[in-house]
Amino acid sequence: MKKSIFSLSFIIFSSIAVYFSSEFVFIKEFLKISPVVVAVFAALTFAVCMRFNKSRVSFILLLLLSWFFKDSTPYTGSIPQNEFMVFIAFNVLYLANSNERGVISVHGLKKLVFIVSQLILLYYFTVHSDSVYNESTNSIITTIRFMMNIQYFFLPFVLFLIAVFNNIVRDKSYDISFAVGTASGLAILTVLGGDISGLNMIVASTLIFIGTLSSIYTISYIDELTGLPGRRAYNEYVAAIGKKFTIAMSDIDHFKKFNDTHGHDTGDEVLKLVAKVLSSVGGGGKVFRFGGEEFVIVFNGKLKEQTVEYLENIRGKISETPFTVRNRATRKKYKKTGQKSKQTSSKNIKITMSFGASDSRTYKKPEKVMKEADKALYRSKKAGRNKVTV
């Protein structure tokens, strides 16, 4: 839910930023933006996207560039603006729903050929005086021409809305959020009678660049399964921590046995549930997923005795949170037949966690404190699990 809200916020923000950037006349005059500057700026953004295998936003950026240079480019300048916008919107939707498989690859080449082929067909059907599109009285083609009339122009926005819905519900990639938002902003600008300026394109390229960096950060620092900061984020956090701190190590009791019994899919659901509960720990504790079923909580500015209350509260909350395991056999049967079994047995199981904490009084380096916390965790397990040891 949180990622969906962020994605929608990025889409709205980038749309507004691109649209209103055309109003900043004084900036436009100050920068003296030329098409060459726009091309260089976009090329740098494209290079960053390509370096990190962001093929989808790379091609969306190329589409937006073709839109900006449309009137000054042979052939495309003759294509009507409305039809060209539908071409842009359709391919933004297509790319937003495609997979990341690299720009310089067979898959990237296929995407490029698919898009260029559409552009060639679009030129033929809309520019040639004897083309089917211009001359046909067929009801379907007449309806399409009618839909392209600016007074009834809604098709591109339907396509953009589908792309937005897909991003906030299914994909949730921040780079796509910014890319879809910038394309929507340019579409709104065009429909309302404005021209895409160099400043609009530089703002669009900047937003796509920011979206790419946000996506890279998420991949590098945020655990995909639980949504918690990962080990790399932990390493950077403790590298800049103060002199007084506590590190608490924790893991889920009997998790390997649970995985073997109920399957890894159910195990993943347990990890998500535990992460959600752990993230509500008080006392200013910051939670990280360290790997597997291990989680780390760091309390900056607190000694271990001051964290016991918060660790005990969170331990109790986890053990009191019910988790329902459904019968795997009946679930598989339901997927195959579409019919619910009469024996849809399920059961609630109790999840518990063990904790061990240590602080910076004995050792100053975080890695040493963590080792001591790990020893305390081992003592919790040896004492019967579902305990906090400091």
Image: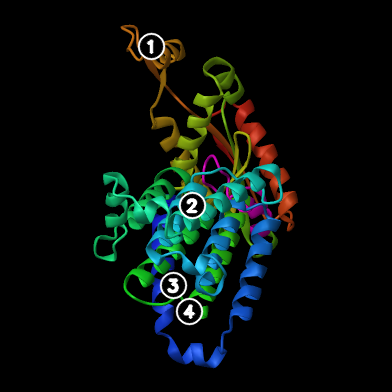
Q: Are marks 2 and 1 in contact (CB under 8 Å)?
A: no
| Nearest to N terminus: mark 2 or mark 4 | 2
Q: How is the image coloured?
A: rainbow
Q: Is residue 248 left or right of residue 67?
A: right
- The reply to whether dot 3 and dot 1 touch (C-beta < 8 Å) is no
Q: Which residues are magenta?
A: 220-237
The residue shown at (27%, 50%) is 143
Does the magenta run of residues contain 221? yes
Residue behind mark 3: 18
Q: Residue type at mark 4?
A: Ser
Which residue occupies the foreground of this view, 168 or 346?
168
Q: Earlier in the sequence, mark 4 or mark 3?
A: 3
CB under 8 Å between callouts 2 and 4? no
The front one of 234 and 78 is 78
**Can residue 385 be seen by looking at this rendering?**
yes
Tell me the amino acid under the disc marked 1. Answer: Thr
Q: Is residue 40 above or below residue 86?
A: below
Disc ID at residue 337: 1
The kind of residue tagged 2 is Asn
- Dot in front, 2 or 1: 2
- How far apart marks 4 and 3 lie (CA) works out to 10 Å
Image coordinates of residue 374 in percent, x first then y, are 68, 39
Q: Nearer the viewer, mark 4 or mark 3?
A: 4
Q: Which residue is mark 4?
A: 197
Magenta segment: does it hold 349?
no
